[in-house]
Image (cartoon, rainbow, N blue to C red):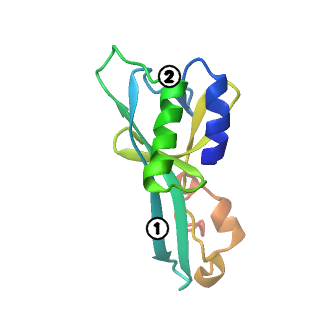
Amino acid sequence: MKLSQIKEILPNLENVAFQLENGKFVPEHFHVTEIGQITKNFIDCGGVIRKETVVNFQLWNADDFEHRLKPKKLLNIIQLSERKLGIEDSEIEVEYQSETIGKYDLEFNGENFILKNKTTACLAQDACGISENQITIKSSECSPNSGCC
């Protein structure tokens, strides 16, 4: 989801709710502690230089039960960050604490914002010699001599 999309959705909501893919909700007394733009300059394992820019939202589960972030307030925070930081209309990446800080893509199901699990991937598959079969097999399905590990 891009920043422009969340800005279109928020005015039509009564409450802001974030839900993990497993169905569990971020506690409703969460805070958005940061909104920023992150640019990552990197080189992949095939030697290709890449650049990725995302708008980052950081959610924090506070013990502040008296305040709930309403859609208008979140929209105001977004607009402030755009004015003060010059944030672009990029894809949103959400940081949320579980065992460690997790990074999630963001979708909307018509009612709640869904934190979509992100995964790693090889960006230079042709340079690594990894076959399509090896890519589709999950590591939990690997066994010795299976060719996937």
* Residue found farthest to the left: 63
Toward the viewer: 65 or 97?
65
Q: CA distance from mark 2 to mark 1?
A: 31 Å
Looking at the image, tell me whether mark 2 or mark 1 is earlier in sequence order.
1
Is any atom of residue 103 visible in this view? no
Q: Position of residue 106 (x, y in %)?
A: 59, 42
Residue 37 visible from this viewpoint:
yes
Q: What residue is pinned by disc 1?
A: 40
Residue 138 position (above or below residue 50) = above
Q: Dot 1: within a 10 Å radius of its alpha carbon, few (fewer than 14), some, or many (20 or more) residues? A: few
Query: Mark on residue 70?
Result: 2
What amino acid is found at the position of numbered circle 1 in the picture? Lys
Q: Give the amino acid type for the residue marked by disc 2 in the picture.
A: Lys
For mark 1, give the secondary structure: strand
Tell me which residue sits at (50%, 41%) in the image. 78
Residue sitting at 63 percent across and 75 percent down?
130
- Image x and y of residue 41, in percent: 47, 73
Position of 115 relative to 86 (above/below): above
Closer-to-camera residue (21/77)? 77
Mark on residue 65? none
- Marks 2/1 in contact by CB < 8 Å: the verdict is no
Give the crowd class for mark 2: few <14, some 14-19, many >=20 residues within 10 Å.
Answer: some
Q: Residue at x 53, y 34 (%)?
A: 75
Residue 47 drawn above or below residue 52: below
Q: Most extreme residue toward the top, as rendered?
A: 66
